Image: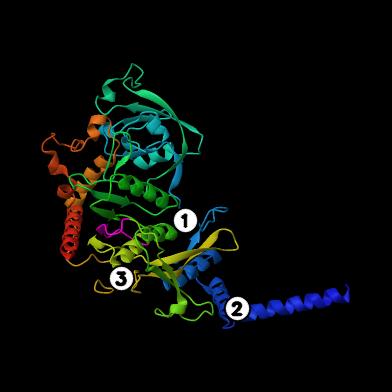
Amino acid sequence: MPKRNLVLLCLIAIASLLAWAARDRGGRGRLYGEVTGHVGRMLLEPVDDEALFRGAMEGMFARLDEHSAFLSVEPGSLSASEPTAEFAGVGLELTAEGRDRLPAVITPLVGSPAWLAGIAAGDRIVAIDGVAADRMRLKDAVAMLRGPSGSRVVLDIAPPDGDPAEASDEAGHVVATRSVSLERALLRSETVCGDRRRADGSWDWFLEGEEGLALIRLSRFSTHTLGDLDRALEEIAVAGQPAGVILDLRGNPGGLLDAAIEVCDRFLDEGVIVSMRRRPADGTRPVPTSAEQLDVRRATPGAILRGVPMVVVVDGVTASGAEIVAACLQDQRRAVVVGSRTFGKGTVQTTVPLSDGRHVLRLTTAEYLRPNLAPLHRRPHDPDDQVWGVCPDRGHELTPTGGTLEVVRDWRRLRDAVPRHPAMATVGEQPVAGGDGGDSSARWPRHVDPVLGRAVAAIGARRALAEAGD
């Protein structure tokens, strides 16, 4: 072997030893090997190495925060990207509460294959690719409807009225149905919604029964949210300056951080939107109030709807990016917050693939702080009187009962559904489960949804205060 190569090998060996010594400075790796060796040789009931390793990982991560984890993944599926709210399917939202134990359509997704084929709210799925759907679990029906974009699925559809069980031929096949062949397509869930659907599937952005008061509901923050919000705001502007805007973040679990920041920026000209606290590059412990250790995101000029009273509605499921939006608009005094205290999820997780290709680490690497630098995150043992999450403004706290929430859920489901007939889309005529077509004003949002009612009152109070100031 040439002398030069021998010297190079020696240098590599020395460097490797030094790297190992630096990594295992406390000898813990060697001690771990020693412990597992004794356990493997001496324990009365043998335990395989994989079980010991798993136990070690579980013990290690039990000492970390509640969102860090050691996870197994399918080979080739490692990804640290955020969800985009896209999926391939036919575009049907289903419920298991249909008659005859058949999956029933809540609403088709506007523009989807199901929508284009004329499938409407209330229709029942009798069979999927020839497989009877009665007694089928809802999740199994949904799984059969999804598949690769471009593939086809055949549905047997029965209308809402009539009894398919009574309309069968001698072979037992249902006659009172129509067979629809659909080509699956790449779809995306709507993340920006209004008060109720029109007959053409578009949203009416103005709250029924409240003149000039706009309602924008954000269900999560995805790659499409900002563009959809801008289009909604343009449609609202066509009607002139609104009397107020309600931004409903109830049930919003978060999503893309940048989308949440951009939403805040739409309503602000200046000021801090959110700060992120990370561990310093030198590995020292982060200092909560150290400006050098904060990644600060600020608003840029160009706010829309200046001077328009604004309310943000939250609940106990509002989390992460949605809490950033609520906290920002509250701290910057741009909006009043109405509802109940938010979830308290204010940390950032980073996914780290491991060398075996079968495991990843999910580690908490940053924390969100409000513009006033108060924490958003609630740690497992933080009491209710600790500072975390977003609390409604004083006098605007409201937590509905379980029964009320159930009524609101069913009412909202009907308003979100695309009407079967154009007449159903007119104000006050949206069909109501079990209703008899009485006084339509009794079904207005402020009467059915008490939290929205409180938000409407808050808008009125802000307008009165502004007028008094003038």
- Mark 1 residue crowding within 10 angstroms, few (<14) / some (14–19) / many (20+): few
What is the residue that sits farthest to the left in this orientation? 439
Q: Which residue is mark 1?
A: 82
Instruction: Name the residue nearer the viewer: 436 or 218.
Output: 218
Q: Whole-percent x and y of residue 313? A: 26, 57
Amino acid carrying label 3: it is Trp
Please identify the residue farthest to the front as the structure is shown: 470
User: 306 or 370: nearer the eye?
Assistant: 306
Q: Quadrant of the N terminus?
A: bottom right
Residue at image x 25%, y 33%? 99
Left/right of residue 123 with respect to residue 39 in the rendered view: left
Q: Which residue is mark 2?
A: 23
Percent position of residue 309, x then y:
24, 58
Crowding around mark 3 (Cα neighbors within 10 Å: few <14, some 14 to 19, many 20+) is many
Is residue 431 at all visible to an observer of this figure? yes
The residue beneath circle 3 is 388
Q: Looking at the rendering, which quadrant does residue 255 occupy?
A: bottom left
Magenta region: 305-320
Q: Position of residue 344 (x, y in %)?
A: 32, 66
Tag nearer the camera, 1 or 2? 1
- Residue farthest to the right, as pictured: 2
Q: Secondary structure at mark 1?
A: loop
Q: Amino acid at mark 2?
A: Arg
